[in-house]
Image: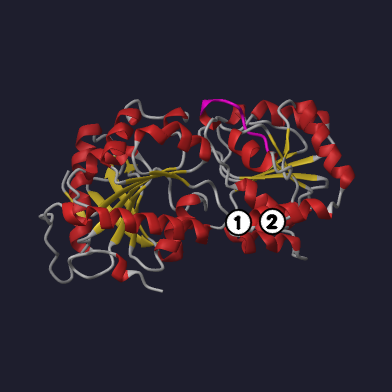
Amino acid sequence: MRVQSSFPLKSGILPDFVCFSHLRWDFVFQRPQHLLSRCAREHRVFFVEEPVFENDRSKATIELKEGSGGVRVIVPRLPAGLGASRTVNVLRRLLKQLFRACRIRECIAWYYTPMALPFTIDLDPILVVYDCMDELSAFRGAPPELKANEEKLMSQADIVFTGGISLYEARAKQHRNIHPFPSSIDVAHFARARDPVEIPADELRIPPPRLGFAGVIDERMDLQLVREIASLRPGWSIILIGPVAKLAENELPRGPNIHYLGPRPYSLLPQYMAGWEIGIMPFARNESTRFISPTKTPEYLAAGKPVVSTSIRDVVRIYGKQKVVAIADSSHDFVSQVERILQRRNDPGWLERVDSLLSRNSWDATWTSMMRLIKKALAERTEQRRPERAITPARQGTVAGESDV
């Protein structure tokens, strides 16, 4: 069902969504991809990535390509060595070119990164949405100005979503219109792992029992815990699927029973999970994981896999208390929980509890709830809409191209 009549737009057309993200669209399929691909069923969605700096480039250009789910992916490509101030100015000009070329008039600005704020100051969106999915300032390599930019973004946003309950509680007093939306799940996709499927060859050659992790491998993982588990049980295979980010080679745990398979397509994850005995979430307990709500928790469960996790707050409160995820922090406790699950094998009562919990959780339902709140916020802004922005439509045949630097 179309939602055009729900938006109080002067043009009478559906608004475009222009998203600014610190994550690449093709990096891993997670929260932004789930939400914005659903958005793209009704709206044009432009996903603006952080710029790529290239040493052999003399002109700044903007690349527009078709992403999965009908999302239009925007990649600014800039000459290396511009400097912060000049980079912002060039991005502002490129963004104006994009708006003209693609005839973006009435748009909803959707932010995943506060670092986009300096080069989006010329926009005049009908609504500003901040989907605060993580405490980015606690991540390794976070820019020092990120916190200040986030304060500005929080003050300008019409509506704020958070990626978990703990993050919501930490932000609740910072905005009048803020709502928690923890990690959700496409149950049908991952439930394919419960059926007879062909396990990929690179995993099939690894001996069971297999303990699997699928996600970004970065500073949020307790690397020492992985080392100790592998050392305590050399007969177990630890399978790590996903890109390695922000870690040096000598930081990664190594061993004959630790297997890095690299990134794998979202479409194939159920087949890999089908070959696991247990899904593991060996997250570190530090500032970077204080507010996370791991998407992989419901994904492992939907795949029918028992889960052992460290005591991440949102995992404990949502899944641990329901006794569908085992919690362990030390390597010896982690090993004990895995052994208990391996010995128990099939527990029909556990799977029933899992399915009951997951039945109340889906990305479709999350997006529907978000859109309901967005429509309400738009209705509240109807009487205080700012004047039309001065960006003029492009002449026929204009394309987003080069910008002098």
Q: Residue at x 85, y 44 (%)?
A: 342
Q: Can you tell which quarter of the image residue 131 is in?
A: top left
**Residue most extreme to the right:** 343
- Tell whether label 2 touches label 1 (CB within 8 Å): yes
Report the front residue among 30 and 188: 188
Q: Residue at x 36, y 29 (%)?
A: 143
Q: Amino acid at mark 1?
A: Arg
Coloration mode: secondary structure
List x then y, in percent, for residue 250.
61, 27
User: Residues in magenta?
Assistant: 281-287
Label 1: which secondary element: loop
Near-viewer residue (37 or 244):
37
Q: Mark 2 falls on what kind of element?
A: helix
Nearer the observer, 381 or 251? 381
Q: Position of residue 40 (x, y in %)?
A: 39, 64
- Quadrant of image for the N terminus: bottom left
Question: How far apart, in angstroms, are the residues tagged by discs 1 and 2?
Answer: 7 Å
In this figure, what is the number of numbered marks? 2
User: Which residue is disc 2 drawn over?
Assistant: 356
Give me the disc on residue 360: 1
Q: Quick check: 56 left or right of 324?
A: left
Q: Is residue 148 magenta?
A: no
Label 1 packing within 10 angstroms: few (<14), some (14-19), many (20+): few
